[in-house]
Image (cartoon, helix red, strand yellow):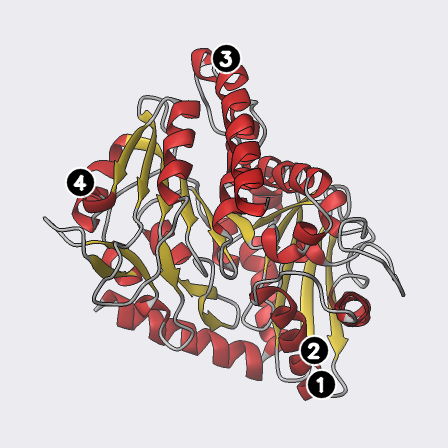
Amino acid sequence: NIVEIQQNYRQLMDDIIVNYPEYFLEKYKNDLFSDEILKNNKYLNGYSFVEYFTTDSTIYTIVKGTKSPIEFKSVHLDKPEKFDQLLKQFSLLFTIKQGNAKENEIDRFLNLNNELRSIIWEPICENISKNVLIVCDNRLSSIPFDVLLSKNITSANNWKDLPYLIEKYNFNYLPSLQFLNLKAPTPSHNKKKFLGLSYSPPQPNKMNILPLNFAGKEVDDLSRLIDGDILTQQQCTEKNIQQKASEYMILHLACHGKADSLNGNESFLVLSEENSNSPRIVYAHNFYSSSLNNDLVVLSACESALGQAFTGEGIIGLTRAFFYSGARSVLSTLWQVSDYQAGEILGNFYKNLLNQQDKASALANAKRTYIKNTTTTYSHPFYWATYIISGDPDELSFSAGTSARIMVFGTIIGLFLTYLFYKRFK
């Protein structure tokens, strides 16, 4: 079947990259960076491009600045196992929900950050512009570049005032190295704007899945902001997604999710059973043959950006499944989502989209707003760095009437979030 053929192809690509990296680099240059592509490819106009792929002992990087030629760089890893341990320790700082920071946690973060930055960012950042397209392969796929620091820091008192790269760059991820060669689907101007689906498992339930207390409110507020439609609880089914989502520019899913690192196609969302409110597991491969063709899919679910990692091909999981369904771009997450912060950050993301910001800028500015306005405790990257945007970086095309409503509903959402904050943390 198609999925099996794709997996065999990815394994072959892995073998070529690992065993013949020089050949791969030369072929990659000829296939993806010809003079014609550099001139006509929309993704390379106004964006810097960085592609990482790794072998056992070397990190190869292809870099294209907006005003600089293509550069091929490499960093030799004297102790590859030490680098893998560095990545693991760095990722663990963000994947466990944070309360009050541990006494030495910031110092540990700074030490790990300084070391990682010197390997994957310092060698390539000289000609990088504000807007950056990034392709990460298996080893780097769980690293949010937002949280790398723009300079070495040896001590800090809190998470809020650190010089994160998010303050200087707008990162847009690409699902694979082949994505640059694809012609993006034509944006849809005649579709309805927004379909939001939310599902919080009833308590108790047969799978012992916890509720999502703010999921319903999240899609309700966003639908009011964008003048959209919602399907909640027993209406949040795979069948409704398959039958109705293609009518909308934006598909927004607020539900539980889980990545599978051994078989990315078994990554899943938790939706509702048909004709019942009981939870049902819906796997990534269920969407491969869909024709949803949304301009933007937002997966407001845990670990929706993760899955099975392939060298040179990126991550196979929920995000990739929705690209196969025709999505032009996908917003997804690298670890667990904090239910309350999701509403705040995504609310600002949509407001920025309505102001005609491109998707990467809209998300980056939403994160900047959150960091600026939140408390020092909740400025920990766990709460804001989980969100990444992948695919076509262009802005969405909304009607003038929709943009005007942002002034009214933006104020309502702000007041509601303030109320939730004091209710929850008083």
Residue 33 in view, yes or no: no
- Type of amino acid at the residue the image marks with label 3: Ala
For marks 3 and 2 on the same chain, the one whose residue lies earlier in the sequence: 2
Q: Judge depth for marks 3 and 4 and give the one in front.
A: 3
- Identify the secondary structure beneath mark 4: helix
- Type of amino acid at the residue the image marks with label 1: Lys
The disc at residue 243 is 4
Q: CA distance from mark 4 to mark 2?
A: 45 Å
Q: Check contact, mark 1 vs mark 3: CB within 8 A.
A: no
- Type of amino acid at the residue the image marks with label 4: Gln
Location of residue 392 with respect to 33 vertically, above or below: above
Q: CA distance from mark 3 to mark 4?
A: 30 Å
- The image quadrant of residue 319 is bottom left
For marks 4 and 1 on the same chain, the one whose residue lies earlier in the sequence: 1
Task: Judge the density around disc 4: few (<14), some (14-19), many (≥20) Cα neighbours within 10 Å.
Answer: few
Where is the N terminus found, in terms of image quarters? bottom left
Q: Which residue is mark 1?
A: 82
- The image quadrant of residue 208 is bottom left
Q: Which residue is mark 3?
A: 404
Position of residue 154 measured from the top left corner of the image (x, y, whole percent): 90, 65
Q: Check contact, mark 4 vs mark 1: CB within 8 A.
A: no
Q: CA distance from mark 4 to mark 1?
A: 49 Å
Location of residue 300 with respect to 225 vertically, above or below: below
Q: Residue at x 27, y 72 (%)?
A: 4
Task: Judge the density around disc 2: few (<14), some (14-19), many (≥20) Cα neighbours within 10 Å.
Answer: some
For marks 4 and 2 on the same chain, the one whose residue lies earlier in the sequence: 2
Q: Residue furthest front?
A: 426
Task: Judge the density around disc 1: few (<14), some (14-19), many (≥20) Cα neighbours within 10 Å.
Answer: few
The disc at residue 86 is 2
Of residue 185 and residue 409, the one placed in the foreground of this image is 409
Where is the C terminus found, in terms of image quarters? top right
Of residue 254 and residue 44, the one placed in the foreground of this image is 254
